[in-house]
């Protein structure tokens, strides 16, 4: 069961994520959705990891694209956490996107879409936000995002306090020095801010971080201090 989630979820949302974890565990025996073998507790850990992306809110009506979604991580947890946000799960592997379609139907996630194909060719709903979980280097992820992204005026969107500034929010691990340098060289107009996941999920996540990449603009009132 999902406990100690890093964001506030109601009983129904927690139940939905527990069902999702059970479905991933079951289907993972046939389709490699997460590392094998994976117990229910292992999948719940993956879900909890993804919920770190929801520690700052997303505005209602925003479009979020998950690059390399695999079995729906983080697309499914985000669709559950933000029912008024449109989430698009993108993956080049047909078996994985079919699995996410199945999960969306069984969980009743009308706000979750699936797009099968390479990220470079994506032509689905234009994102305001992109997310990813250890899919590609920061510069590559930002390139995918920038090619298709639409601007979002947080004031016009009546964004909740502390909402993510539009851009890329991803989960990373290890030394990001080289990735950050590559991003800065390829896209000098961006700024990247990393936050240790131990602040959100506890000390066992000290080697992981949450990275937010956005276009350099003047500070917005919704930005965290």
Image (cartoon, rainbow, N blue to C red):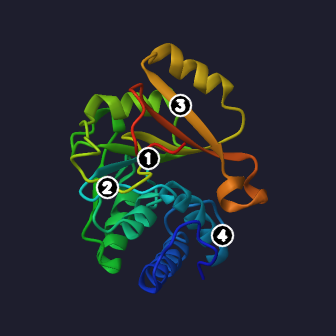
Identify which residue is drawn at 35% across, 78% down: 107
Q: CA distance from mark 2 to mark 3?
A: 21 Å
Q: Is residue 209 left or right of residue 75?
A: right
Q: Which residue is mark 3?
A: 192
Question: Which callout, 3 or 1, points at the residue further toward the start of the chain?
Answer: 1
Q: Is residue 45 above or below residue 67?
A: below
Give x and y (percent) for residue 43: 59, 70
Number of residues whose C-alpha sits closer than 10 Å to that of mark 2, classed few (under 14), some (14–19) or many (20 or more): many
Nearer to me, 59 or 2 = 59
Image quadrant in which the N terminus is located = bottom right
Distance in Å between CA atoms under marks 2 and 1:
15 Å
- Crowding at dot 4, Cα within 10 Å, few <14 / some 14-19 / many 20+, comes out as some
Q: Quadrant of the C terminus?
A: top right
**Does residue 27 appear to the left or right of 159 in the view shown?**
right
Task: Give the alpha-carbon distance from disc 1 to disc 4, as whole Å.
Answer: 21 Å
First in sequence, mark 1 or 4: give its number: 4
Q: Nearer the viewer, mark 3 or mark 4?
A: 3
Q: Which mark's residue is nearer the viewer, 2 or 1?
A: 2
Q: Helix, strand, or loop for circle 1? A: strand
For mark 1, does the 10 Å Cα neighbourhood hold few (<14), some (14 to 19), or many (20 or more) residues?
A: many
Q: CA distance from mark 3 to mark 1?
A: 14 Å
Q: For the residues marked 2 and 4, what is the alpha-carbon distance in whole angstroms?
A: 30 Å
Q: Which residue is mark 4?
A: 42
Q: Which residue is mark 1?
A: 131
């Amino acid at each position: 069961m999902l406990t100690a989630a890093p964001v506030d979820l109601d009983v129904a949302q927690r139940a939905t994520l527990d069902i999702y974890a059970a479905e991933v565990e079951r289907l993972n025996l046939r389709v490699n959705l997460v590392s094998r073998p994976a117990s229910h507790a292992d999948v719940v850990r993956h879900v909890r990891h993804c919920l770190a992306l929801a520690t700052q809110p997303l505005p209602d009506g925003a479009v979020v694209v998950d690059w390399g979604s695999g079995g729906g991580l983080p697309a499914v947890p985000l669709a559950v956490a933000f029912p008024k946000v449109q989430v698009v799960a993108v993956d080049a592997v047909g078996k994985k996107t079919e699995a996410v379609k199945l999960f969306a139907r069984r969980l009743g996630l009308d706000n979750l879409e699936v797009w099968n194909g390479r990220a470079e060719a994506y032509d689905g709903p234009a994102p305001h936000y992109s997310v990813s979980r250890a899919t590609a280097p920061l510069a590559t992820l930002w390139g995918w995002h920038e090619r298709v992204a639409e601007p979002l005026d947080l004031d016009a969107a009546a964004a909740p306090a502390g909402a993510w500034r539009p851009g890329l929010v991803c989960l990373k691990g290890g030394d990001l020095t080289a990735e950050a340098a590559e991003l800065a060289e390829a896209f000098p107009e961006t700024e990247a801010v990393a936050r240790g996941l131990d602040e959100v999920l506890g000390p066992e996540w000290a080697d992981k971080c949450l990275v937010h990449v956005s276009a350099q603009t003047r500070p917005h009132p919704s930005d965290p201090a």
